[in-house]
Amino acid sequence: MEKIIYNPEFVTATILNWYPLLKQTSYKKIILDSLHYLVKKNKLIVYAYCIMDNHIHLIWQVKGEVLLSDIRRDFLKYTGQKIKKDLEKYNPEVLSYFKSTQVDRQYHFWERNPMCKDLYTDYFFEQKFNYIHKNPVEAGLCDLEEDYEYSSAKFYLTGEDKLGLLTHYRR
């Protein structure tokens, strides 16, 4: 099999019906832990992220012998399953919001078909990069991009990456 080299990709994945499910810190941690696992397993490079209450933005790049579509699918499926297990245990009443009408699943947490854009130019990359980091400011969650805890903005200001998750896009 010929090795595939992917461009970085901008991804926006939204919780079903824009429900603010990710407001809960433990669900943000599920997202970050999943990304960290993929980085550690050398399947993914993460350049930027922002986890909002009802959606996430990422700039990532797939590495190795794995298909981009498989990474997307597995990431969303895994995070959905982890959230489902937590809801079953601690907030079963919330599960009804995510009851699926599809025959292949009982619950559905992520909207189908996340928005994914190939970042094939520096200009397009930086446009999406800036958009991601401005998102919490525009939503009124903080005054400065770097003050939002669930974003990579602080990394680009200070170089600090407590999770060992990020790769600087200019390196």
Image (cartoon, rainbow, N blue to C red):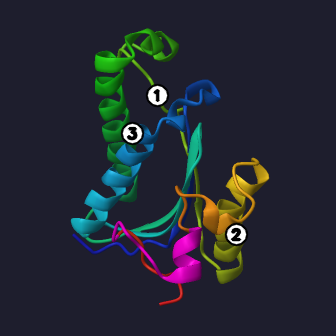
The spot of residue 110 in percent (x, y) is 49, 33
Residue at point 78%, 53% (across, down): 138
Residue at point 32%, 52% (across, down): 33
Q: Tag 3, which secondary structure? A: helix
Rendered image: mark on residue 49: none
Quadrant of the frame with the N terminus: bottom left
Q: Earlier in the sequence, mark 2 or mark 3?
A: 3
Alpha-carbon neighbours of circle 2 within 10 Å: few (<14), some, or many (≥20)?
A: few
Which residue does the numbered mark 1 point to in the structure image?
109
Of residue 88 and residue 59, the one placed in the foreground of this image is 88
**Which kind of residue does numbered mark 1 sit on?**
Phe
Q: Which residues are magenta?
A: 153-164
The spot of residue 4 in percent (x, y) is 34, 72
Which residue does the numbered mark 2 point to in the structure image?
130
Left or right, 40 with reference to 151? left
The alpha-carbon separation of the residues under discs 1 and 2 comes to: 27 Å
Rendered image: mark on residue 26: 3
Residue 102 sits in quarter:
top left
**Marks 2,3: beta carbons within 8 A:** no
Q: Earlier in the sequence, mark 3 or mark 1?
A: 3
Q: How many marks?
A: 3
Left or right, 150 with reference to 44? right
Q: Tag 1, which secondary structure? A: loop
Of residue 6 and residue 58, the one placed in the foreground of this image is 58
